[in-house]
Image (cartoon, helix red, strand yellow):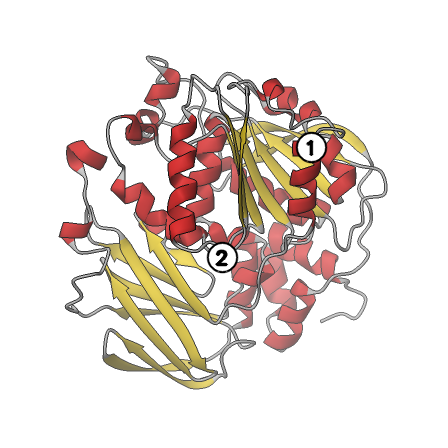
Amino acid sequence: MPAELRPHEARTLCAEDPAEAAARFGRMDVTAVRRLLAGRDRSPRPAPGTREVVLTDADGRTTEMAVYTPPGLDGGQAGALVVLHGVGGSGPELLPRFKAFAGRLNMAILCPTAQPVPDRSNRLDLAGLFGSRFDAPAWDLAGPGFPLAALRWARTTLDVHPDRCVLLGTSMGGLAAWNLGMRYWDRFCAVVPVNGALSLWEAFGTDHRKRALLRNLLPVPAFVVHGAADTRISPRFDRESVGHLRSLDHEALQYVEVAGGGHGLGTLGIEHEDAPLFRALVSFLDGCRRRLPVSAITHRALEARHGRAHWAGVDRLTPHAVAEVRAVRLSASAISVRVSGARQVNLHLRSDLFEPGRIDVEVNGTRHVVDFRPDPARLVRSYHDTADPALLDEQVEELPVPDVADPEAPGRPEHARYAGEAR
């Protein structure tokens, strides 16, 4: 690899032109390539101020995104705060209300604008919020969409530190912060739902499928805010979610119910630097870093598109089930996996966690021998997919999942309640 190529330049090349990067780096040692992609240097500082950019998601859809970078942003350790607006809002309208966080946290503020989501189930998840406005712009609560595209943009364009990325959302954005945080918890160092909920279906009964995903948030710090006088989305929803996380012994969880606070953001006192809630949130987020490396993974999924967490994932999910993978790195050449609610497990192998050569893998009691041969081209493609050094892989191994009798597995039909009670 050319010595003159700096880490942020290598990341930009892999993100923008993976074919050229693979040709350029394909014969290099994978360890050197991986270290370069994960390395931090003093990349050129972005110009301070506010701008609007066109953001493109993984499906090729576009939207506008407002971005604020404070003066003196530290390119080596700067983070990103992705803020999601509520119904009827937009990124440019919301951005000024969160600019004060940028300098205090050494973070760029990114506010994308939602677009209509054609999926009917997504519309129904938000029906209580929109009423009959099913065609209104909305966040995709189950898919990566624009929020994760904003993260990728921040990593590739601003070269922010991938371990200092926070997801915050208000109202409809609060629902997205909960749901995307649960599904893609390995991407964030903290989530901040404001006046949100897991699911507005819970006005009619517990949404057991969504609540099964709450366990995914245990490794992620969460700061939850709700107005006590909110009449549009009852604080009861967030109280119950926080109570559920506390029952699971979540180690970094704060809940603030603002006395007299309503649904409007201006009633909460979160925007002003002299407000106690602002100072508390800054103090909480300032110490948040993503925990790496990860040797043991527990991840639940309702769909294959959010089936992966770090280096393990599930595919071919059982219909209506809550799939779960529990993967443990026993050593550099041994992995133990238990899976329920899915017929396939995917292992994303990388040579800083696993030794090339023979790897013994046990899946639900069935033993497999995997021949791990690191592939530099695969490494480059994996960076292009997420622009996240923590999600790199050099080989993806797909293994079948045998049946296993486990009455407590969340993927078994009796534990996957749906239809009228919880869809």
Is the residue 15 above or below the residue 230 in the image?
Answer: below
Determine the residue positioned at 49% across, 27% down.
Answer: 195
Which quadrant would residue 242 be assigned to in this image?
top left
Cα separation, mark 1 vs mark 2, equals: 26 Å
Residue corresponding to mark 2: 219
| x and y, in percent, of residue 269 in the image | 65, 25
| x and y, in percent, of residue 404 in the image | 17, 69
Q: Is residue 107 left or right of residue 365?
A: right
Q: Is residue 69 left or right of residue 216?
A: right
Q: Who comes first in sequence, dot 1 or dot 2? A: 2
Which quadrant would residue 142 be assigned to in this image?
top left
Residue corresponding to mark 1: 276
**What is the residue that sits farthest to the front in this orientation?**
259
| Residue 59 in sight in this render | no
Q: Residues within 10 Å of mark 2 (few under 14, many from 20)?
A: some
> Which is nearer the eye, 76 or 387?
76
> Which is nearer the eye, 123 or 11?
123
**Residue type of the residue flagged with mark 2:** Pro
Is the residue 409 above or below the residue 415 in the image?
Answer: below
Determine the residue positioned at 26% across, 42% down.
Answer: 208
Q: Residues within 10 Å of mark 1 (few under 14, many from 20)?
A: few
